[in-house]
Amino acid sequence: MENHQDIVSFIWDIADLLRDTYKRNEYQKVILPFTVLKRFDCVLEHSKDDVLRKYNEYKDKIEKS
């Protein structure tokens, strides 16, 4: 995506896809969680490999509820 208008078009295309599945008042149930997840992914990108390595190290040692 090269410019602002391309990004806007991309976002509206996604909204059009959601319209078939979700009612307008249900968008926040999908958009907000994915926005938060994407933000976490971007902020933590530099440490993702370390986090995954630690997760794999401890995953069998953690008690599951």
Image (cartoon, helix red, strand yellow):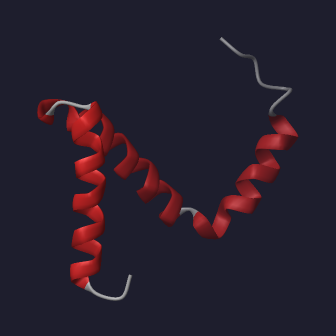
Q: Residue drawn 12% across and 31% down?
A: 25
Q: Residue drawn 75% across and 51% down?
A: 52
Q: Nearer the viewer, residue 50 or 6?
A: 6
Q: Is residue 39 left or right of residue 10?
A: right
Q: Quadrant of residue 28?
A: top left
- Quarter of the picture holding the C terminus: top right
Task: Name the residue at the bottom extreme.
Answer: 2
Q: Nearer the viewer, residue 3 or 63?
A: 3
Number of on-image labels:
0
Q: Is residue 35 left or right of residue 40?
A: left
- Quarter of the picture holding the N terminus: bottom left
x, y percent for residue 48: 67, 60
**Where 31 falls versus 22 (above or below)?**
below
**Where 63 falls versus 8 (above or below)?**
above
Q: Residue drawn 22% across and 71% down?
A: 8
x, y percent for residue 58: 83, 36
Q: Is residue 42 left or right of residue 23?
A: right
Q: Nearer the viewer, residue 38 or 51?
A: 38
Task: Name the residue at the top extreme.
Answer: 65
Task: Name the residue at the left extreme.
Answer: 25
x, y percent for residue 26: 20, 30
**Where 17 falls versus 24 (above or below)?**
below
Q: Residue drawn 77% across and 24% down?
A: 62
